[in-house]
Every structure is written in C-alpha cells, then in structure tokens.
Image (tube, rainbow, N blue to C red):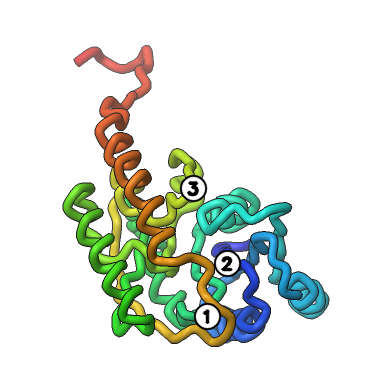
Amino acid sequence: MTEVSIVIPARNEASNIEALLDGIDAACAPVCDYEVIVVDDASDDGMEAILRARMAQAPRLRVLRHDRSGGQSAAVHSGVRVARGGIICTLDGDGQNPPEELPRLMAPLRVAGSGDVGLVAGQRVGRQDTLSKKLASKFANGLRARILKDGTRDTGCGLKAFRREAFLALPYFDHMHRYLPALFARDGWQVAHVDVSHRARGGGRSHYSNLQRGLVGIVDLAGVAWLLKRRKKSRPTEVFASEKAE
C-alpha cells in the first residue's frame, strides 16, 4: 500500500529530472512505501521522452502531462488529485531542493499522535540563488508574514509535506502553493517547520522573473487575506437521540 506520494511539478527540466529521480529513490526507498508523480507542465525540451523511457524500469514512477502550461500550483494540484498516498511530499523539478531532505520532512506526519499536524513546510537555509532573487524573496516573505501572520519565513520553498485530504479541501487558485501555511492554519491544522538545505540549479533556467512573481503576488496576497477573514468559524457536532441535551 502506498503511504507517501511525492509530487514533482516540472517544466522543461530535461537536464535535471533524472538525477532528481535517482536522489528520491536513494532517500526514500529505505524509509517508506512511496510513489513518484511527475507532472509535466507542457514541456517542450524532450523531458517527456526521458520520463517515458524511465517508466519502463521504474514501477514507482507515474507521469501526468498538462496540455498547456498551468504553473506550479496547477501542477501540484493535478498530482495530488491522482495520488494514492495519504501523505504528499512536494519538491521542485529543477534539483534545487535536495531529495535527501524528504524523510525529515514527512516524519512529523508519520508518527503516532500527529493527527493535528496538517502541513510540514521546508524553510531554506543557505539559499543558492542570485542576490536579486534572494532580496526579492526576502521582501515578499516579510510582507506576506506581516499581513497574513502565518509564522513562516519562507513559503516559496518547494519542499513541503502535507495530508492529501486536507490539501484537497483548500480553495484552489493559481499560485496557492506560496500560501499553504496560511491556508492550512485557516482550516484549523497545525503547521510545522523544518529547516532544509538548498542547491544551485543543475541545468536549464528559471521560468519566472522577480517582476512576474511580484505582480501576481500583490493580487494573490490581497485574495488570501480576504479568504482568511471569510473562513468558516462554526464547527458542527452530530447529535444522537441517546445523548442528553446540554
């Protein structure tokens, strides 16, 4: 029985995907029963052929392909919907999230008595990115934390672990992956944090600029703040005839 599903959103990562899959197998095979779901977000660099060839020798590997690019949140959502595991782990397809961090990330969700923890969020230490990207990320994270008060310093980290049913109960919108701590907390789940390492990109290039992230982030932040204020506050308890009225 599959316990953990590892979902990888990937677009044009032909130069990175095989090394990433090798690393996942090395890190997770001794730990749990798992599957790997690569969501190919309409790549055109030959990654699809690489994945098809690998599937013949990798029974744990599943591949979804979008008919058009939908972005990271859409890819994660597509992968989680078809996942067989009750615990989901995510990491980026560019190889910057070390797969050896996965066991530590999923551990809080696998222990007995952890039912209140819905999300374990990785937070990058020693980030291997350009100065401009790090500064832009620091500003965006600071602004988000002040407005949403989600207690998370780095929501842009692709390394996350969460309960499948809890994620699917969240309202979907593009770029929601950057707001998962606030959204999980909104639904009453505890959010745990794990410091994780970070690597330089092995090949290819980033698909989004700092300006693109900033422009969509302004709209998203306002929308998430609205969602938090409009959350359902009442919780039902079923009443049975045999019980005494309070």
Q: Residues within 10 Å of mark 1 (few under 14, many from 20)?
A: many
The reply to whether residue 207 is in sight is yes
Question: Residue at coordinates 23% horizontally, 53% vertically from top-left?
Answer: 150
Q: On the picture, is 229 further left or further right than 73?
A: left
- SS class of the residue under badge 2? strand
Pointer 1 and pointer 2: residues touching (CB < 8 Å)? no
Pointer 3 and pointer 2: residues touching (CB < 8 Å)? no
Task: Quickly name the residue at label 2.
Answer: 8
Q: Nearer the viewer, residue 206 or 188?
A: 206
Q: How many marks?
A: 3
Q: Earlier in the sequence, mark 3 or mark 2?
A: 2
Label number found at residue 224: none
| The residue positioned farthest toward the front in the image shown | 211
The answer to whether 218 is drawn above or below residue 223 in the figure is below
Where residue 175 appears, as percent x and y from the top left, is: 45, 52
Q: Nearer the viewer, mark 3 or mark 2?
A: 3
Question: Residue at coordinates 46% horizontally, 82% vertically from top-left?
Answer: 98
Where residue 205 appears, as percent x and y from the top left, is: 54, 77
The answer to whether 56 is drawn above or below residue 193 in the figure is below
How far, Cα to Cα, is label 1 from label 2?
Answer: 10 Å
- SS class of the residue under badge 1? loop
Query: Looking at the figure, which quarter contains the N terminus?
Result: bottom right
Task: Quickly name the residue at label 3.
Answer: 174
Label number found at residue 95: 1
Badge 2 amino acid: Ile
